[in-house]
Amino acid sequence: MLKRKAATFEAVAENRRWEMTEDLSVPLLLLPGTLCDARAFGEIADMPGAVPVDLTGHSSVDSAADAILAVAPARFIPVGFSLGGIVALALTRKAPERVAAMALVATNGRDAPPETHAKRRAAVRGRNPAVLVGEDLWPAYVHPSRAKDEALRELVIAMACACPPGTAERQTEIALSRADSRTWLAELDCPALVIAGAEDIVTPLAVMTELAEGLPNARMAVIEQAGHFVLLERPHACLTVFSEWLQSLTESPQRPDNRADAAPPTRPHPPEAS
């Protein structure tokens, strides 16, 4: 099992580090999506300095962010997938001086409209996690070419089943409690990477593009032939993009300028599952 509790951040970071410069060691805090753990990050999870974060015990964005900040290193890079990206945004807004950079994957920067709350709560209440992710949500999770990928589906189910009881309900509350970040994205001037699956149904390309465009120092990478679980569908491509971005942080202080590379969304935006 790859999850570690937040209290282990400092001990793990002491032994597993990514050197941002010769003088500064900055751990990567991996913030998983709903009913996920560090396995959702694919090959990025194996990078030196990657520290998994457990988001299964919180019921609001603020409580999750505050708990992480209480025990996290003085400086870190949050790497958020889906729900974890929502928490990464909150962390960066709460403590910008502690965030060296941030990466957001399949992340929705909008709020959840109040009229959708009851339906979203009902959709997860008392549900078997394996059925929820392996049947109900699976068709929206991956690119059509991966719909029959049983190994990938079983991994997504395994992550969901490894979460404590009630995680889906709690993490739904995290998603529902988020603010609309579009009103304050311009305040977050740290280097940022936005990774999007070109055919993500859960968090469409248009939503990811507005996130990248709202951040003043963002680079956007669109991964073709990928859906919401882009980190597992195209692990090598994501690792390459992520590694090159990290390297760019050490090489040049200039802002990345390729965030306009995204194409228009290929599908309509259905009710969110993130």
Image (cartoon, rainbow, N blue to C red):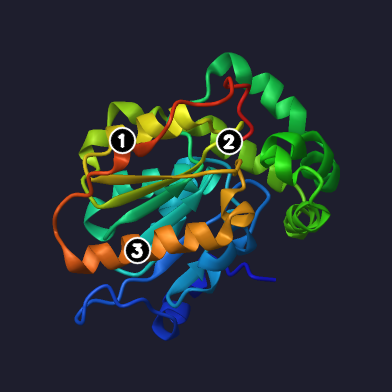
> Residue 250's quadrant in the figure?
bottom left
Please name the residue shown 16% across and 62% down the image.
Answer: 252
How far apart, in angstroms, are the residues tagged by discs 2 and 3? 23 Å
The residue identified by callout 3 is: 244
Q: Which residue is mark 1?
A: 260
Q: Of the two numbered discs 1 and 2 on the same chain, state the one appearing first in sequence.
A: 2
Question: What amino acid type should be assigned to the residue bearing mark 1?
Answer: Ala
Please name the amino acid that badge 3 sits on. Glu
Name the secondary structure under disc 2.
loop
Is residue 232 among the parts visible in the rendering?
yes
Residue at 46 percent of width and 42 percent of height: 86
Image coords of residue 115 (percent x, y): 59, 13
Q: Is residue 126 above or below residue 97?
A: above
Disc 1, SS: helix
Disc 3: CA contacts within 10 A as few (<14), some (14-19) or many (>=20): few
Question: Which residue is label 2 attached to?
Answer: 200
Compare marks 2 and 3 and give the one earlier in the sequence. 2
Q: For this rendering, which residue is in front, 27 or 178? A: 27
Q: Looking at numbered disc 2 in the image, what kind of residue is underneath it?
A: Asp
Relative horizontal placement of residue 111, taking residue 147 as reference (left or right): left
Q: CA distance from mark 1 to mark 3?
A: 18 Å
* Cβ atoms at labels 2 and 3 below 8 Å apart: no
- Give the residue drawn at x 85%, y 42%: 131
The C terminus lies in quadrant: top right
Residue 158 location, quadrant: bottom right
